Image: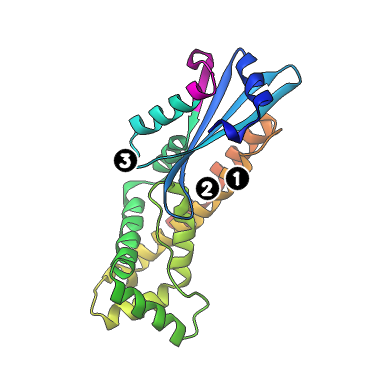
Amino acid sequence: MSSNVTHMQVEDIQLASVLSLAIDESCDIKDMAQVTLSVRYMSSQGPKEELLGLLPLSGQTRGEDIANSVQKCLEDNGIGINKIFPIATDGARKALCAQTFPAEIVEVMSLVIKIINSILAKALYHRQFKDFLEEIDSQFSDLLLHNKVRWLSRRNVLQRYALCLSEIKTFLNEKSIDHPELEEDKWLQKFNFMVDTTRKLNELNLKLQGKGNPAYVLLEEVVCFEKILLLFVEDMGR
């Protein structure tokens, strides 16, 4: 784990009086859950941010498992837990999303995931759907499977679903799978709202990352996002 940072960097971190941790949960290309552990601190040369470790999670990914993995990484690097002040996790983003979307909008996402799973979870259906997309010369060859670990991955899933919606409805009708919501204007309005909102959430998430961004710039981005949400809500009310 300590191989992600040099010995000198670890010593630099150890000398810091206060540390800030950023913990982000995701999956690698083999769909194995892992935790990215970054540390921010003030060194003699000014503020620094280092990747402390990529921690694989085997088995369950409960909060307890993540905490144990992070604690072991800190211990392996000789970093005292008593120096840690704030800890930022991907849960903060999940909380932001949960506050942003009311229950009726979340239900739309649940139906989208249900339909995607009904196609991708069955090998025969999945193969037939891919063949169908190829036959009609679709710009896409498949749907995207939602990664439950990362809430904001839904943007890509929703975007692909929206672009393939016509093909999906045709395929479901051929299989006698009935989802009348897909023909309802009200449901489609909520769906498009969620597609646009998750796209803007991802854009905001990227803008809030990185080094050297002044606090007032980050605040402006959040305020701008809130105004965009209000515009989306107004459009839905028309």
Among the two numbered marks 2 and 1 on one chain, the one whose residue lies closer to the N terminus: 2
Residue 222 pos. (x, y %): 58, 38
Looking at the picture, does residue 49 appear above or below residue 185? above
Q: Residue at x 44, y 24 (%)?
A: 71
Query: Separation of disc 3 and disc 1 at Cα?
Result: 28 Å
Amino acid on which the number 1 mark rests in the picture: Leu
In the rendered image, residue 76 lying in the magenta stretch gets the answer yes
Q: Residues within 10 Å of mark 1 (few under 14, many from 20)?
A: few
Pick whichever, 124 or 161, lies toward us: 124
- Among the 4 quarters of the image, the one containing residue 128: bottom left
**Please, what secondary structure does the residue beneath circle 2 have?**
helix
Q: Nearer the viewer, mark 3 or mark 1?
A: 3
Query: Separation of disc 2 and disc 3 at Cα?
Result: 28 Å
Q: Which residue is mark 3?
A: 60
Q: Residue furthest right?
A: 45
- Among the 4 quarters of the image, the one containing residue 221: top right
**Please, what secondary structure does the residue beneath circle 1 have?**
helix
Q: Which residue is mark 2?
A: 201
Pick whichever, 14 or 82, lies toward us: 14
Residue 192 pos. (x, y %): 45, 61
Disc tally is: 3
Q: Residue furthest bottom?
A: 135
Q: Which residue is mark 1?
A: 206
Q: Nearer the viewer, mark 2 or mark 1?
A: 1
